Image: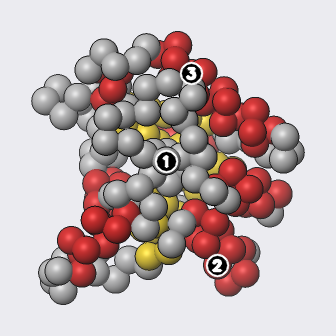
Amino acid sequence: MPILVLDRDGVINKDRDDYVRTVEQWVPIPGSIEAMARLVHAGWDIYIATNQSGLGRGYYSEAVLRAMHEHMRILLARLGARVEGIVWCPHTPSQSCDCRKPLPGMLDTIRALAGLNSLSGVPLIGDSIRDLEAADARAMRPFLVRTGKGQISEEEISANPQHSFHQVKIYDDLAAWADDWLINQG
């Protein structure tokens, strides 16, 4: 089965400047859960790679993070869908790790979980330049959505025509990406 990788905050659920700290604050972006279900029903395996420095900052526990993910899994299950794996980086930007995006450590974990030799050409949908950089490090196909931090990222890319991600295709949200992908690529 083909796979795709999603960022979480700002792509699947609404992002918050003060961090998503509780299950109640984990609010899906309208249409995102349904889009994921459509992709699963079309034969895609979905993996999630998410920076979660709120763990390292002590804003919430791993148990709370797992509860957020369980809430998402329940919403997907109601639509007959699921995610194959969720990988997160708990480190803050000041900590040395190889997993915090833009570094590709989480993507390497997903590659192993999916049993693949390479992630070359695999779509990665994110809302930040660091998502695109992580995808680029593993020759994936990066896409940007305007939800979350996506509009800021789009403005940064647009302001510099020489930006390395100037040619990245941009969508309003995950649902728009899924619809376009299923019509034109699926």
| Residue 114 in which image quadrant | top right
Q: Is residue 101 left or right of residue 142?
A: left
Above or below, 41 relative to 60: below
Q: Amino acid at mark 1?
A: Lys
How far apart are the alpha carbons under marks 2 and 1? 22 Å
Residue in the image at 75% along x and 39% along y? 75
Q: Amino acid at mark 2?
A: Asp
Do tag 3 and tag 2 residues touch (Cβ < 8 Å)? no
Above or below, 176 relative to 57: below
Residue 91, position in %: x, y? 28, 26
Residue 14 numbered tag: 1
Residue 13, position in %: x, y? 54, 46
Residue 131 numbered tag: none
Q: Is residue 176 left or right of residue 37?
A: left
**Which mark is first along the chain, 2 or 3?**
3
Residue in the image at 61% along x and 36% along y? 85
Residue 82 or 135: which is nearer the viewer?
A: 82
Q: Mark 2 = which residue?
A: 180
Which secondary structure, mark 3? helix
Residue 87, position in %: x, y? 49, 34
Q: Mark 3 = which residue?
A: 66
Q: Is residue 112 visible?
A: no
Circle 3: is it few (<14), some (14-19), or many (20+) Cα within 10 Å?
Answer: few
Which secondary structure, mark 1? loop
**Which mark is first along the chain, 1 or 2?**
1
Circle 2: is it few (<14), some (14-19), or many (20+) Cα within 10 Å?
Answer: few
